[in-house]
Amino acid sequence: MIEEKYDVIVVGAGHAGCEAALAAARMGLSTIIFTVSMDSVAFMPCNPHIGGSSKGHLVREIDALGGEMARNIDKNFIQSKMLNSSKGPAVHSLRCQADKMAYSIEMRRVLQSTPKLVLRQAEVCDLMIEDHVVKGVKTISGATYYAKAVVLCTGTYLNARCLYGSVIEHTGPNGLKAARHLSDSLRANNVELLRFKTGTPARIDRRSIDFSKMTEQYGDPVITPFSFDTDPRSIQKHQVSCFLTYTNEHTHDIIRAHLDESPMYSGVIEGTGPRYCPSLEDKVVKFPDKKRHQLFIEPEGLQTNEMYVSGASSSMPEDVQYDFYHSIAGLEHCNIVRNAYAIEYDCLASHQLKPSLEFRAIQGLFSGGQFNGSSGYEEAAAQGLIAGINAARSVQGKEPIVLSRSDGYIGVLIDDLVTKKLTEPYRMMTSRAEYRLLLRQDNADIRLSKYGYEAGLISNEKYKRVQDKIEKTRYEIDRVNKVFVGQNSHTNDFLQAYHSVPVTSGIGLSELIRRPELSYDITAPLDSERPSLPAQVREQVNIQIKYSGYIERQEKQVQHFEKLEDKLIPESLDYDKVPSLRIEARQKLKEARPVSIGQASRILGVSPSDISVLMIYIESGKYLKD
Amino acid sequence: MFMKSEYDTIAAIATPLSSAGIGIIRISGEDSISLVDKLYCGKAALTSYEPNTINYGHIVDADGNIVDQVLISVFRAPHSYTGEDSVEINCHGGIYVMRKVLDLVYSTGIRPAEPGEFSKRAFLNGRMDLSEAESVMDLIASGNEASYKNSISQLSGFLLKKVKKLRSEIIHEAAFVEAALDDPEHYDLDGYDEKLVIQLNSWESEVQELIDSYHQGSLIKDGINTVISGRPNVGKSSLLNLLSGHEKAIVTDIPGTTRDIIEERVAFGDVILNLYDTAGIRNTDDTVESIGVQKAIDAQSKADLNLYIVDSSVYLNDEDIRFLSEFDPLSTIVLLNKSDLYSIVDIDDIHQYFNGKVVIFSTKNGQGYDELKAAVNQLFFDGGLDKDRFYITSQQNYNDLCDALKSLRLVDKSIEDGMSEDFFTSDLYDAYRSLGYIIGEEVEEDLVNKVFSDFCMGK
């Protein structure tokens, strides 16, 4: 039998697995990553875009930490758009249509050209765990791979089955081989699994679509890159359009008439689906008053004529799918290339993880991605990166890197996953980030480079560049705050040109920058001493001055928040010995075993007075030991 | 996630609410000194005082009016009871004034302390012995449970309905904005601000209305602080006895010895009167009579209700006339007593100096008793307690409503400043959360849930 030894094993080469394996190998550890298909590395089985509201933030954060997703999509996008650009900077979100195939090939190339990294096609079927410590994995061929840390990134493949109408196929997404055995191995080690469900719409032949009945959706005239390292000038290129169309009453009638043929509604599907990407069946049932639902027709890449029908996922029988797609304006004569389907799969009840993404009960075992109950490529990649970093650090004998809710969306994502009991696939949303005015996509590098640097994924030179940016920004803000603009005709002529109220006496330059119609860049003519600064610095100066009141308020909230996060709960704490806790709180705390008072306060069913009691108990315990 | 932070600056009355005229309000937290300084008027800013000093000064309201003369102690961390920066205000104006000072303290953004919270902080900052830990935990657990249950069970159906309605409207708007930010190609925010401002104004006035009812509500619950005054022998004791329903010797014959002592808490129709001793209102030193009158007027202006008795069988003297012309008709009722005897003074004589309510009264045979009741109702409850109307009576509810209003006004301010929607949804959510405290609801995932239940999202 084959036996091999590595530092880190990664199971699965989707968006989570690729980031995990690259991180571990780049941190200098010998790493092997398993995939069920060499042709499906970093595959996008559903929508053909990366980024979007709050997900764009995740991609930027991945980049700031030294991950791969941003760099890859910057090479392989076919359309780019900054969403919410008319809103505040906290909700600006970049989204790119990807050339799926090119993205996948590029990721495989990067994996295969990374030193110390082995990419291997094989199905992992067994985890080797001794005394709550992971030792390695076995593949279906009987080969044994030993490692000090294992990262599970099995996505939607565990015991997966795909369904539409009465058709049930026991495969992973897109007909790929499902992982049949790993669930049993996990259960045998007392790991609690959930069953979740998601779905995807049909892919349609571009040549069969009548685009004249749809509204064309263009990319931005000036393209913004995802990666802080990508020179914007290097990626300005011809973009491909998307198209907008709508369902109608007739579409809904067809769906209503065939509801009982959908496995979702006939009771065949056991898994819980996500509310944010409901099937068209769900939309019609839950929002009966809506006369139409909008659909975006998105290209899947440059080497295929497949078009993704965003907004119309379904698990209806094939003939019903044809019927309802044909009822949609522009799709009357469309040819389906791949059917829509629902997929259900086993995933982890993620509160079994520590914030480092290591299993609480199994040392050296980590997990990331859709296996953890999340959904989305970006959520997966973010967790994969953190799981990979921390798997590597555990091998290195170093403390894990844990991002907090005030560090970034990744911190929010992971904290939610390990603290809350998920009842559906988890998707990132900006409303989940309570400090979102601080966690902007424009400052992800400022917030997170230090962690990437600490992990060894950000080079010295790049880290210095970020430090320099921070320094220059701070210096310039201090300078601007001291600049005083006199009341004279030069000032007021200038203001009038921007439809801004003239001043009646001298005014601080920062006051003017705060006016909605003005900005740091616009006010340059009023600021004779202004140094020449790079665009990224000017952007930071502008945002931090313009919204200083809001930013300071939130910074203060963060200070209070962090104090509670810093109050750690001893791992050995026996909640049964804490007097005066309410029964419900006691149960919830025993189950969740929060690491800090801050995390405890976010558990549903734990009240502020329970938290007070807990704080006092821990404090008094400290004294007892002393 | 709970909004009431462990590190907020908190305040409460630290001495038992007893008959003593002096009481201490304790404030603790990192902003305590700078926030109380906003209310303080003394020889220098509070922030400039040395720690552990006691300083004389005044507490002033927003208009600069003096509310009380006080001694203020300033403590700096860690040398205080709680181990945090702290301020203690020694109030001298009695219970009613102390409450007023406390309201002012809250108005600066300081929040009311939870039960046991000072002790908790003291303990967590190592200022309290380990042996006390358990009792503090019990206090917190029992206090919170009790006050929580109490306040919820006391909620009227009206308030419950009103708060629920407000909350569901507010969360719907917050969810709409979030849905639009999350899925901007689906939900459009163009022109939304103008619509929201209209909504905001209506929420604000509804919340304001509830807040306004707190004054009346607290009058119902805590009673109307009533001062009975008048020259000697006009019948003050007799009125007190008549209202309390039994004979009671009162100490008005030794003026100036005590102040603001609740002599009696009596039911008077639908309401409760806290009858205060009148000593101190008259000045015993005739040589400085003018100071005495001023002092009396001050004392009466601090009461909710001033019952001034005039003996109708005796001519008005200078003192009567000075009092009558200074009294606020909105808080004063004049009783023309001894109507059973031959009258020298009639209502018109009083109205020459005082244009408020005058009741012809006899403490001997009870004439005018019902008319007085009606007059009290007229003054405080627009002609009578409306049983169907709602009055906020809990300080906690009042504080939560004030917080909600503050958050809604922040939304207004953001819109006014031209900020986009993402800047103020958290304030909308805060308002929702504050209102939630009133009806005891946790909010955890409400916003995300609402986004999905009200708006069709996603790909």
Image (tube, rainbow, N blue to C red):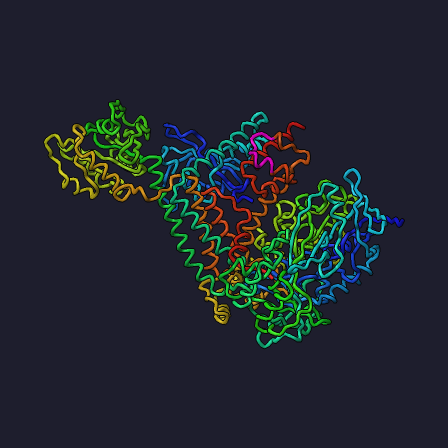
Above/below status of A305 relative to A370: below
Q: Is residue B43 left or right of residue A13?
A: left
Above/below status of A564 relative to A21: above
Above/below status of A222 relative to B79: below
Asked if residue A410 can be seen in this view, the reply is: no
Nearest the eye: A492 or B414: B414
Residue lying furthest bottom in this view? Answer: A212
**Magenta region:** A578-587
Asked if residue A164 can be seen in this view, the reply is: yes
What's the residue at 65%, 75% (across, down)?
A208
Picture coordinates of residue A619, whole percent (x, y): 61, 32
Nearest the eye: A213 or A601: A213
Picture coordinates of residue B169, whole percent (x, y): 45, 53
Picture coordinates of residue A234, whole percent (x, y): 71, 70
Image quadrant of residue A599? Answer: top right
Residue lying furthest left in this view? Answer: B342
Q: Is residue B115 left or right of residue B156?
A: right
Image quadrant of residue A605? Answer: top right
Nearest the eye: B154 or A180: A180
Picture coordinates of residue A429, whole percent (x, y): 59, 55
Residue B36 in the magenta stretch? The answer is no
What's the residue at 44%, 64% (across, down)?
A504
Residue A585 in the magenta stretch? The answer is yes
